[in-house]
Amino acid sequence: MEELREESAERLSRPLIRLAKAKGVATYYVGQQDEYVEIDDDVLVNVLHSLGVDASTDDAIAEALAQTERDRYSRLIPPTILHIAGQESRVRVNHGVTDIPSARLMLENGTEYGTLEGDAGDGAMAKAVNGRFVVNSSIVIPADVPLGYHTLTVTVGTHSDSATLICAPDKIELLDPMKDGHLWGWMAQFYSIRSSNSWGVGDFNDLKNMLRDSKQKTDADFILINPVHAGEPCTPLTPSPYLPISRRFVNFTYINPESVPEYSELSEEAQANIRQLHAAVEALNDDPDKIDRDAMWAAKMPALWALFKAPRTAGRQKEFEVFKALAGDDLEGYATWCLAYDKWGAPTDAADSWVKTTTRDSDEIARLRGQYPDTLEFYRWLEWIADEQLADAQQTAYDAGMRIGIMADMAVGVHPYGSDVWWNPERFAYGATVGAPPDFYNQQGQNWSQPPLNPEYLARTGYKAYRDIVAGMFAHAGGVRIDHAIGLFRLWWIPEGRSAKEGTYVYYDSAVMLGILALEATRAHGVVVGEDLGVVPDYMAKSLAAHGLLGCAIEWFEQRDGKFRRPQDWRPLTLASVTTHDIPPTAGYLRYEHVKLRSRLHLLTGSEEEFMADAKREHDALLSMLADGGWIQREWLDDEEAHEQDLIEGMHRALCASPSKLLCATITDGVGERRTQNQPGTNNEYPNWRIPLADGDGNSVSLDGLFDNPRVQSLAAVMRGEK
């Protein structure tokens, strides 16, 4: 267990180690195989540099330690304070020996809560800082402060400091049906599921129909979808939904042009032009081999330009203006980035790339915005339409009777040259990227190339950047899945120029981030799932559960030392599924597609024979456990290929025996697809995130009639407990 590991007293006394710990940088970690790993000094120095801390010499380390202490006591109160609704709490105030602090609380709605009382109970503490004594007293935050993001101002003499007071519930309450039972739904990479009306890629209108049909025909209560964060405005489009340009906004390439209200007001000639553009890519809807996003967007973008130019009613224009006002400066950042990309080309790592030579305040950017006001407005408009269509899909789910509807997926981070980083560089740490240390499934570790959010910036600004992301996602969803939820606690930072193995963890204030999730989920009457797979400390699962967040239970991963745990013994507060998007669908996994693929792509650290032997042991152990539990018949194992669907349904039948509060079946398992959507550790070596939905024979499967498919219907009956 990680908490039982200890560094030596000699190591703990070293100034570099003390500085790293003071800045939230891990100096050791415990891996998946329970191995204890101490972080090399040069890695610590590099990561501290990414936080803006010079640790290159002994003198620099000494000064950084002293500055850290000065910073701690220079403010009257911390810039961000978490308060739990319904409980009284105290905020420590730093002040001089003879000073008497006073405090006022302004609520987020603009009303004043009033003057808060002080408590001198901590006043005995005294510390010399910068030649003066600092003592502590407390401000009492009452239990009846309402939920929200408030402003606490403390004054001592003529000096005042303000802080964001986040008043959050202690936990997210389960939805009523989950308290004594469970809900179930589907998991889908919805871009891969095309209808006869698609433009070659699944869009928001397809998602809307998928939600409605899945409820009406299978009684599902949610669909867990791929991230729909904002992407590039021009081709080539990045395939991965987990490497977005901005997590604050929505990917407008998913817009369905014919669903834009102004489409019906176009002239017959203009509608005919859009139909012609649509017809040019209709054949892509039946391609079973590869999603062609670039061809889709090349046809769809001129159609959207025509719709943007169409007259809007006064009411519609007012709605657009309200959207822009609420989205604020972040929308200006994303739209401006899109404009620069449109006119100057894709940002690159070249020294003369516009993303490196300009900032939001550059004269060149001001001239560009002035030169192309129409194009700038077009990108604002695209975001408005995308927001509308995603919200419409969620409302359709609620209207159909779904309890959750869309379960959105939050990516870990953003593209290093995306709008979030370019427009607001102060939010991020530089010289490091986010990834994961080595584990059983990714033996070389992972580097996701994404710059991490700076935890000190978040604390200084009341976590507003994070709050806006979470609130934006719950505006279009009844649930949010947090990819790599360990990032709420710590992230694996990899210094520039080093391998994924040569990093360390940097810690975040999980209490505040979990509090924000609890607050936004409570406001939306929603649920939060934290993906807690891989190298995860035990305290994380306990903390997620204490805050009412669900973890993940993947049937293939619910094992230890080659022995599978019975579903009845799984954690109740989980979203349970058989598989996930980073391994093949169950039909493929049963046929060892993961072994063959990793060998073909040279991703194994050992031999293929060794990995295949381990995979077979895992395979046999799981199926034996299922047979012992009565979820499959043991004689099916004599001819697995002939009983493929029986085995897949048996694996899902076992899910229903678990106490998990949410159960999930993948659309790919519903139709017998074998190909994985994503192979970690690869880019273009494998067509990640470009695999269309197909059946086991390689035939394209359309959204039209998907939920009437006998195999889908049969799996749905299992999930409903009817088989």
Image (tube, helix red, strand yellow):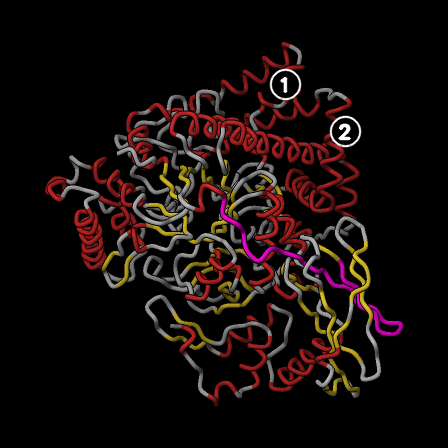
Which of 126/680 is in front?
126
Which of 482/300 is in front?
482
Whether 171 is among the magenta residues is: yes
Magenta stretch, residue numbers:
151-175
In the rendered image, residue 38, in percent from the top left (x then y), is placed at 43, 77
Quarter of the figure that contains the C terminus: top left
Say which residue label 1 marks.
263
- Please report contact status of discs 1 and 2: CB closer than 8 Å, yes or no: no
Residue 185: image quadrant is top left
Give the residue displayed 35% in from the left and 27% down from the top. 701
Relative to 341, does residue 263 appear above or below in the rendering? above
Check the image and name the residue furthest to the top. Answer: 268
Relative horizontal placement of residue 469, taking residue 615 as reference (left or right) = right
Give the residue displayed 47% in from the left and 44% down from the top. 240
Task: Determine if residue 353 is in view.
Answer: no
In the rendered image, residue 52, in percent from the top left (x then y), is placed at 64, 70
Relative horizontal placement of residue 286, taking residue 563 as reference (left or right) = right
Give the residue displayed 25% in from the left and 63% down from the top. 561
Relative horizontal placement of residue 653, taking residue 87 as reference (left or right) = left
Say which residue label 2 marks.
318
Give the residue displayed 49% in from the left and 47% down from the top. 174
Q: Residues within 10 Å of mark 1 (few under 14, many from 20)?
A: some
Secondary element at tag 1: helix
